[in-house]
Amino acid sequence: MKRRESTIEPMPISLSPPAPVMSPVHQGEATHCPYCALQCGMYVSGGIGEAAGGTLTITPRHDIPANAGGLCQKGWTAGELLTGGVRLTTPLARASRTSPLVPVSWEEALDRIAGAIRETQARHGADAVAVFGGGGLTNEKAYQLGKFARVALRTSQIDYNGRFCMSSAAAAANRAFGMDRGLPFPITDLAEADAVMMVGGNVAETMPPFLRHLNNALIVVDPRDTRTARQATLHLRVTPGTDLALALGLLHIAITEGYADQDYIAARTTGFPAVRESVAAWWPERVERITGVPVARMREAVHLLGGAGKAMILTGRGAEQHSKGVDTVTAFINLALALGLPGRAGSGYGCVTGQGNGQGGREHGQKADQLPGYRRIDDPAARAHVAGVWGVDPDELPGPGRSAYELLDALGTDGGAKALLVFGSNPVVSAPRASHVAGRLAALDLLVVSDFVLSETAAMADVVLPTTQWAEEHGTMTNLEGRVLLRRQAVAPPSGVRSDLAIISALAARLGHDEGFSADPGTVFDELRRASAGGVADYSGITYERIAAETGVFWPAPSQDHPGTPRPFLDRFPTPDGRARFLPVEHRPVAEEVDEDYPYYLTTGRVLAHYQSGAQTRRVAALNEAAPEPFVELHTDLAEHLGVASGDLVRVSSRRGFAEAVAKVGRGLRHDTVFMPFHWEGANRLTNPALDPVSRMPEFKVCAVNVERAGSQPSDRGEDA
């Protein structure tokens, strides 16, 4: 086969603007980046339209600690999302599933959706209509979407794509600390730590400004030699799916070598004896055989953490997106507790939240088991409080629904939803076993997608609603620190576009709820404050005015004179006895081991130029030029064994499907492992939907695959629907 020139050189990290967006520095409207959970501060100036020349200027803000004047390439080029001519500006609908999408009026689109909802629920019941939200939605949208599902639709079938991101770390933090707040300390505290362990996170590519906070000894746990790993003091190149065993081994070493902080353990924790007993069998040599990490490197990692005056342990998706993700994070929390880190200034455990509002999006009700304020939907007191704010009887609120993958997997089946409304998500690309999920979407009687571009999921829809985006609307976001931030409208949206809040309001009115679903974000936020009052994530003391004055407020903030809570664990943990909980966990194998037919591990992740499913970034010229196509990264030895060179087209197959992409050959990962980015269709056709029993997180980060040159003997492996 003819070799293609490789076009997948990684994009350089840049905290200054690339040449195409260089412009005079001047302030505009203060807002925040549309991408990751750092929520970097930026100014947007200029405008859209003939008079403004259709251009916008992006400049960084220095008053937001997360980025403090820096932006990555995605941030610098974010204005192109608003001006690039790829926007949807009119509703689209198709006459039948085989007909093309054509422009229709808003009235026609909304009437059709409401009519189909009424008909579907009359035939099949309230749960026949489902809602799928997103971790990039503002707090106001996430809140209103949860209320819309439970009050206007009366359905329990609502979940969101954040289930695929932070749910395992959230569940582990809740059961250990009594609270899930990604970083339970300001990001600037990282600079105080003498040592930081990053487990399964590649912040150098996913959120480059994060790096300015890591001026310390850095330990990276990752199967790949990522940009972050290359900057580390110590890199533990772990076999995919064995992070839990590694954590058990590190804790074993910490205890046996005297690094456990016995005074802290006695004063601030419970459950240590059971954990100490459970890790006694995880001697380092056993752990090396499972993980591939040499004993000497494990000891060095423990010495760096245990010998540091201040230290932090952080987890990312690489540790969490597993069918044992909750236990894996718990094991690293146990290590942090044994070392006496959580609740000490400059030390601690934290989860590096990924999506833009991944924190706030999991607090206010778009999860299947949740009500606003991080309340449980099966808690009678929580139901009574929220029902009082909403003006409904608590008994009218539905109970818990299906988790994200289970909801998608059941679409169009007996007992599953027959209609689905999608806001801010692209599951055709982002869900595990994606070809199967696309088949389930095709089996629906009605698929509605609200988006600002024609994503792969929107292209399958019966009705597509064009929505406003980040700089065209007001709203709040809660970043990875738990700091509530204010996104301000900087430009007017295109004519014909409506906000998600306006869409929800219009649909609710057509379903008999003329009141209670405001399209005004400020009004919705004030209601969110009341609904969250008294909950774990209490926003009742936070206002738009206060956020603007203080450049962000840390929750919980139960009153307007409360200072906010940047470090909630300093004095006590929010558990009944004020102590953090050690919990014994045991390593178990990955859900799908390699075998003769599928002899290699696949792991997935991001690249610098793109974000999530790529629906936004693949439409930005500079980013698409930097990373125009997916690739398969494989070790030089494996490539030689397969007869593959960089630029060759290769096929990767799993039990669920196959994908083809160009090869990227090097020594940056284990010889038994291949890597694919998930920003394009392909990688998630392969991934395994095996679920964590607690968080219901799919096992995105490891599955068994076969790799071969494309065009060699055709493979009929793994092409399920």
Image (cartoon, helix red, strand yellow):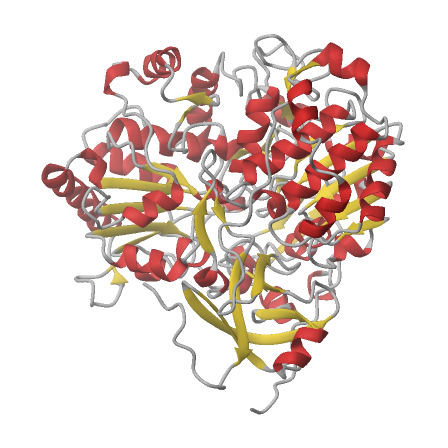
Between 23 and 211, the residue placed more toward the observer is: 211
Residue at 80% across, 24% down: 260
Query: Along the line of sight, which residue is nearer the eye, 371 or 282?
Result: 282
Q: Quadrant of residue 12?
A: bottom right
**In the displayed image of the protein, which residue is found farthest to the left?**
123
Residue 40, picture quadrant: top right
On the picture, is 681 further left or further right than 416? right
Residue 45, image x, y percentages: 63, 48
Where is residue 207 shown, x and y percent of the image? Answer: 68, 48
- Horizontally, residue 586 falls left or right of residue 346, namely left
Q: Could one spot residue 646 in this view of the protein?
A: no
Q: Could one spot residue 508 in this view of the protein?
A: yes
User: Compared with residue 680, is residue 389 higher up or lower down, i.e. above or below?
Assistant: above
Residue at the bottom extreme?
2
- Work out which quarter of the rendered image holds the N terminus and state it: bottom right
Q: Position of residue 50 (x, y in %)?
A: 51, 61
Residue depicted at x 58% and y 61%? 601
Which residue is at a point 60% across and 23% down the rendered structure image? Answer: 176
Residue shown at the point (74%, 59%) measured from the top left: 225
Q: Quadrant of the C terminus?
A: bottom left
Residue 403 placed where, x, y %?
A: 38, 38
The image quadrant that residue 504 belongs to is top left
Q: Is residue 493 above or below residue 551?
A: below
